[in-house]
Image (tube, rainbow, N blue to C red):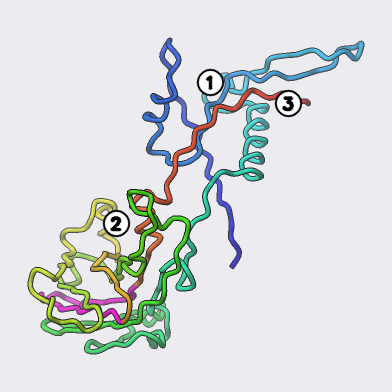
């Protein structure tokens, strides 16, 4: 698939103080944006010709009468600014997605028609179709049972974003968050405990090493969706070079068994979380002439 640039434009209105805001104040005010931030001028200088053909400057408002929505010339101003951003954008190259470079791997079998990915090895549990109408499949783990998902960590190639807090190149490129993807609804599915084993080293497995998945303790972002029957993911451990095994124990009795639908390594997610891929840009463009 080709690369693409997706632009989301949000017009944010606020009442400025009598004293103009400083650049630091503006950055603090708009820090949640983590994007490219423009301060819109209130007027635009437009050059018109009079009856004698002489050029005259006229000021036209970029905003409509409500001082919030853009006027016709304001829309034109924004359109030209977007063209400028797309033609000479200042975003840094981001890590590649996929096992071919960025350290991302994905194994997903919900719509697999009853088969696991070829390079994923499973032990225990059972692959079952739980929705015949939509042909959805899950790897089910019954109460008191254990299951294992094993895969080989592909080589992670270094990118421009692979730097530690001191700006030095990060050498531990194989340590990538492992996300377990499962069906989530508190009243239907059991709690489970999960541990990641690297290269069959079971000596590090103990009660403290397990991570518990409890559907009654979902993160705030997903909590509001819990009345729906949805998929959810959690980071259950970190990969290392070689074979990585996710060990899953179902530890409670509920109406339905634990249903696992995927496991993925998302290095791009970790970079984003650590603000490596997040940048704040602020531009104070000079007011340009827009000719009718």
- 48 shown above or below 216: above
Which of the numbered marks, if any, corresponds to residue 225?
Answer: 2
Q: Write the residue at 85% across / 16% down.
A: 49
Question: Which span of residues is magenta-colored?
Answer: 243-263
- 186 shown above or below 80: below
N-terminal of the two: label 3 or label 2? 2
Q: In the image, residue 143 lies at what x, y percent?
A: 13, 81
Q: Nearest the camera: 143 or 95?
A: 95
Q: Magenta stretch mostly in which secondary structure? A: strand
Q: Write the residue at 39% across / 57% down.
A: 169
- Identify the image quadrant of the C terminus: top right
- Crowdedness of circle 3 by 10 Å Cα count: few (<14), some, many (20+)? some
Total marks drawn? 3
Q: Is residue 284 magenta?
A: no
- 77 shown above or below 90: above
N-terminal of the two: label 1 or label 2? 1
Q: From the image, state whether disc 3 or disc 2 is nearer to you.
A: 3
What distance separates the C-alpha of mark 1 from that of mark 3?
Answer: 22 Å
Q: Nearest the camera: 35 or 141?
A: 35
Q: In the image, residue 231 lies at what x, y percent?
A: 32, 67
Residue underneath mark 3: 290
Q: Nearest the camera: 47 or 196?
A: 196
Q: From the image, state whether disc 1 or disc 3 is nearer to you.
A: 3
Element class at badge 3:
loop
Residue underneath mark 1: 66
Q: In the image, residue 144 lies at what x, y percent?
A: 10, 83
């Amino acid at each position: 698939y080709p690369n693409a640039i997706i632009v989301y434009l949000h017009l944010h209105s606020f009442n400025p103080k009598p004293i103009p805001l400083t650049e630091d104040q503006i950055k603090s005010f708009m820090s949640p944006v983590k994007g490219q931030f423009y301060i819109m001028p209130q007027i635009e200088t437009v050059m018109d010709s009079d009856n004698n053909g002489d050029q005259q400057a006229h000021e036209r408002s970029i905003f409509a009468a409500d001082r919030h929505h853009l006027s016709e010339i304001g829309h034109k101003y924004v359109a030209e600014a977007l063209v400028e951003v797309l033609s000479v954008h200042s975003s840094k190259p981001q890590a590649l997605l996929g096992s071919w470079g960025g350290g991302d791997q994905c194994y997903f079998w919900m719509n697999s028609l009853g088969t696991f990915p070829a390079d994923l090895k499973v032990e225990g549990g059972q692959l079952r179709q739980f929705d015949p109408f939509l042909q959805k499949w899950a790897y089910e783990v019954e109460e008191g049972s254990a299951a294992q998902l094993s895969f080989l960590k592909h080589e992670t190639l270094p990118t421009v974003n692979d730097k530690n807090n001191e700006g030095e190149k990060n050498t531990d490129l194989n340590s990538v968050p492992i996300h377990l993807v499962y069906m989530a609804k508190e009243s239907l599915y059991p709690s489970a405990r999960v541990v990641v084993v690297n290269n069959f080293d079971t000596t590090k497995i103990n009660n403290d090493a397990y991570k518990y998945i409890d559907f009654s303790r979902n993160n705030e972002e997903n909590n509001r969706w819990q009345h729906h029957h949805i998929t959810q993911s959690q980071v259950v451990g970190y990969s290392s070079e070689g074979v990585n095994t996710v060990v899953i124990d179902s530890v409670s009795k509920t109406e339905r068994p634990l249903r696992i639908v995927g496991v993925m390594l998302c290095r791009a997610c970790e970079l984003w979380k650590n603000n490596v891929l997040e940048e704040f840009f602020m531009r104070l463009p000079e007011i340009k002439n827009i000719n009718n």
